[in-house]
Amino acid sequence: MTTGRVQVENGELAYEVRGDGEPVILLHGGMLDSRMWDAEMAALERHHTAIRYDARGHGESSTPTERFKHYEDLRELMAALGLPRASLVGLSGGGRIAVDFALTYPELVESLVLVATGLSAMVTKDPFVLEQTKKLEEAAAKGDLPAAIEVILRMWVDGPRRGPADVDQEVRRRCQEMYTQTVVRHGLSGFTLMDELRATERIGELTPRTLTLVGDLDSTDIAAIACRIESEARDARKLVVPGVAHMINLEKPAEFSRILLDFLACS
């Protein structure tokens, strides 16, 4: 195992590398950090070079002070590690970064695994998410961090079809810890200072072999994105995972690792 820090423009990224073989880079969800990939690192390192990193404004990486692009940070990470090409696995906001990267640097992407992914310039329509977003704004206005974190858990861990008691409490605890540490350490700088593409208008330009996963209990917005990727990207298929919402790999780590390894083995 190797850990280190890579200098990027006006910042730095903390990363970890394990194993040997075809490289796979894991991109964590927004407000989470690379610890969400513990199980996948253990599964991947047997047959692949597994790389995970904290996006800028998250985890052990630096706090942004100027405008930046997450997908350009990824390019600089790959260059620093001497990776001419890699498969990308991204959950939620990590998938959003992976898609922007694949649109900008398709020659650097072997394959894509997009897990409950968002897309840059997506528009929220799900009534549940809109309702929770209003509650989040109210909690933020009061400076009530625990209440704000609970709303985020409701949106992106429980999802619209479950209550908190219906979800594995260890999964909730881990996400709560990561969400809280991100806000305390970095604020929302990883979001407010980032520049993105408009990937929602360019899905048809995605050329890598792609698997998109969506939980059947997730937001309708996320389900709609998975359907669009399957129908509009050049080489994509969708897999619906039953009994989970947004945090597919955290709720079903063994099943997720099996799906991931099977897909990578066919690359």
Image (cartoon, rainbow, N blue to C red):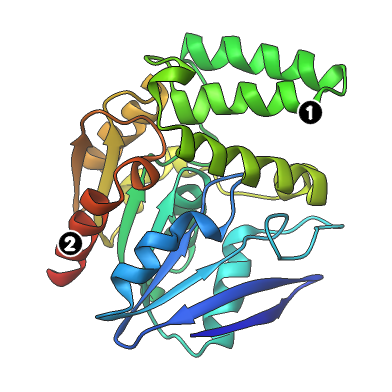
Task: Tell me if I can see residue 233 in this picture.
Answer: no
Q: Nearer the viewer, residue 164 or 82?
A: 164
Residue type pointed to by label 1:
Leu
Q: Residue at x 17, y 61 (%)?
A: 263
The amino acid at mark 2 is Phe
Could you tell whether 138 is left or right of 23 in the image? Answer: right
Q: Is residue 97 above or below residue 192?
A: below
The residues bearing labels 1 and 2 have C-alpha atoms spaced at a distance of: 39 Å
Q: Is residue 30 above or below residue 100?
A: above
Q: How many marks?
A: 2
Residue 7 rendering spot, x and y as whole percentages: 73, 80
Residue 145 image label: 1
Rendered residue at 80%/58% (across/down) = 63
Circle 2 residues within 10 Å: few <14, some 14–19, many ≥20: some
Q: Residue at x 21, y 30 (%)?
A: 242
Q: Position of residue 163 (x, y in %)?
A: 44, 15
- Please, what secondary structure does the residue beneath circle 1 have? helix
Residue 263: mark: 2
Left or right for 2, reference 90: right
* Residue 249 percent coordinates (x, y): 35, 47
Instruction: Name the residue nearer the viewer: 40 or 58.
Output: 40
Left or right: 104, with 234 as reference point: right
Instruction: Write down the quadrant of residue 71 in the picture.
Output: bottom right
Tell me: residue 244, above or below residue 13. above
